[in-house]
Image: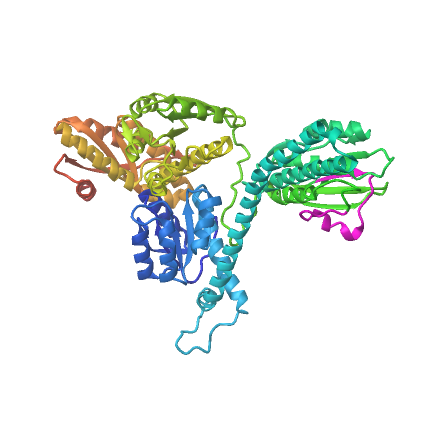
Amino acid sequence: MSIAAPSRLIRILVVDDTPTIRLLFQRMFAASGVFEVVGEAADGHEGVELARKHRPDVILLDLAMPVVNGFQAIPSMVAECPESLIIVLSGFNAESAGEQALSLGAHAYIEKRHRPDELLRQIVDIYRSRMARHLDESGGDSPADDADLATPVTVEEAVHEQHRQQLPVVRQLESTNAALARSNAGLATFAAVAAHDLRSPLHVVVGFSELLASAYADRLDDDGREMISSIVSGAHRMEQMIEGLLAHCRLDGPAPATTEVSLDDVVTTTISTLAPDIERSRAIVTRDSLPAVIGDPVQLQILLQNLLANALKFTAEGVTPRVHFSAERGDGGWRITVADNGIGIEPSKREQIFGMFVRLHTQGEYSGTGIGLASCKRIVDAHGGTIHVESNPAGGSRFIVELPDRDAVADPVSDTDARVTEEEPADAQPERPLDVLLVEDSPDHAKLINALLRRAPEPGYRLHHVSTVDEARQVLTTTEMDCVLLDLSLPDANNLEALSEVRSAATLVAIVVITSSADEALAFAAVSQGAQDYLVKGHIDSEQLSRAIRWSVQRKTLENELTRDALHDPLTRLPNRTLMLDRLASALARSERSGKRVVVFFMDLDGFKLVNDRFGHEAGDQFLKVMAERLRGAVRPQDTVARIGGDEFVIICEGFNGHDFEWQPLQRRLIAAVEIPMEIAGHAVRVSASIGLAVGGRECDPESMLRDADLAMYAMKRSR
């Protein structure tokens, strides 16, 4: 990735409680040439203090942290550093946590599921687009009249100054936008709840009205029977409206899936679903061969079903409905047409009909709710496409839906919205059922979880159930799992103790805490101590449970990748200095228990510079890769070979009694592995190695042993 470097580095503060994540960001930002890391904090309290001290341009903030979490830190950071751009980077679901973070004053929200280069690009784009927007809003004029301010001499400095001056207006605008977002979310939730709650009393009205009509028909006169009929008819229409409203609200859920969907299959299902209406109207439904598109199969089914139902309904009396589905290739996507011979739509009404509750006819003319076409538009918008209606040359209407190809389906990167959908790689392997370990001592709840997972769509899950933490540890040591569903109230461990025990047995496995406790503090503590998500019993359904598992596995996979990238040399994939020192500390701790000695070899390749100078850096990189493999092959499986920079390697070996003759054969094997000639561009190239070593045990610390081995290596090099 290439990012143009500004004349002034963007000053960034990193607030995250995971050391490997902070290390990765430090290296990523240092290598970018764009950012300068002015501070690192492991909790929200420390982050606020460092923000007050350094006044950074950007604050990169995690949410789940000890002492003070990210939610609690945001208002303080806004108050202390109103000019700073706050970007939240978290593993929580953006739908809930993201909205809350933005409402508290954060400027953007990114989920922890992108690769480092993508994260860097997102952060740069958010910063630059925001700065550029402030400059545009101010007309591009720099504050030259303010005698107390130095005149900016670069575009970045001018942008930064404009950002500071325009901040009150921007804050007010963001506050208004956040309030609007909360209002919209609240309205959608209210509509869904109202639709559910209204159906129950409505069923009572319909039921008793029909019972009254059948049981007391002989006691009612014609007017009474007509009144009862009107009540039943009105109740049924209201029920249809509620069903339509509920279906429309469901479209406000997660972003639509992006899987391959056969429109031929969708139309076949649609015709089957509407078969009673087709037979009743004696309609003729035809189609051309239809393509496969990328989208959400459920939503595309609703789309075409609504369009076909509309075509069947709005037909003149005495006319046989004719509906034809066709498709043609367009620029960057497919153009789907649903043509009918119906009553048509006036040109002035063709945009209006896609509005909510818009009806062009009375109930006496054509029944309906005015929701179907609004849902169609929302579905098409969610897929990045367009929908419009035009006259059919043969009479009637043609509804035209344009759906983009796969590359266009993923949400484009917005200047202000960092919640970007990462596209699946072209060579991604087919999904497989996930192995899930349920740690739950309640048989009834275990049955419920099993039933919920069995209702999940393919590829589904393989559920393994145990009742105690001890049983879970045994399973995790012998069976590979993708996710652990963990109750926090178990016979042999309680609350966070259970989480700690399971996490120690499965450091690479996603953990979803699922318990009857709705304690938010416990939820944050669980996530900050290693869980990927937190669910409450009695408040989840099959879809929510499945989504939590899938997202947790994805987040854990990314976390494992980030950790691996942060602790390994990117060229040779050997442990880097950080991981090497950690392993050396562990070896010394084992030495203290066993009484055995640890040997550290410090190796420098003599003559490697000539390889780079003569054959180029690409050949030099390949040379180092081969050398890394040779060194790995020269030591025991339990030994560590690390590259700590350039042509310097460190080898850690343990289990010795303290005699030279024990490690001397190993030293000779290392030297022999290095001195084997290597062919480069038709030339046999040979280098040698200078090796120093240090021997230690429980009395030593990693840094001092490494320093002693380094000094010994240079002493050997000078003696040659």
Q: Residue at x 14, y 32 (%)?
A: 592
468 or 196: which is nearer to us?
196
The correct choice, above or below, for 481 with respect to 573 in the image is above
With 224 as the anchor, is 173 left or right in this view? left
* Rendered location of residue 442, percent (x, y): 37, 24
- Number of numbered markers: 0
Nearest the eye: 650 or 117? 117
Residue 428: tell me if it is visible: yes
Residue 153 falls inside the magenta stretch: no
- At horizontal 52% and vertical 32% (from top left) the residue drawn is 428
Extreme residue in the front direction: 219
Task: Where is residue 165? Give x, y as percent.
Answer: 45, 69
Position of 295 compared to 579: left or right? right
Q: Quadrant of the C terminus?
A: top left
569 and 585: which is toward the camera: 585
Q: Position of residue 526 (x, y in %)?
A: 34, 38
Q: Position of residue 42 (x, y in %)?
A: 30, 48
Is residue 676 among what the camera can see?
A: no
**Location of residue 608 by image quarter:** top left
Segment colored magenta: 335-360
Identify whether 82 is placed above or below 484.
Answer: below
Q: On the rendered structure, is 223 left or right of 594? A: right
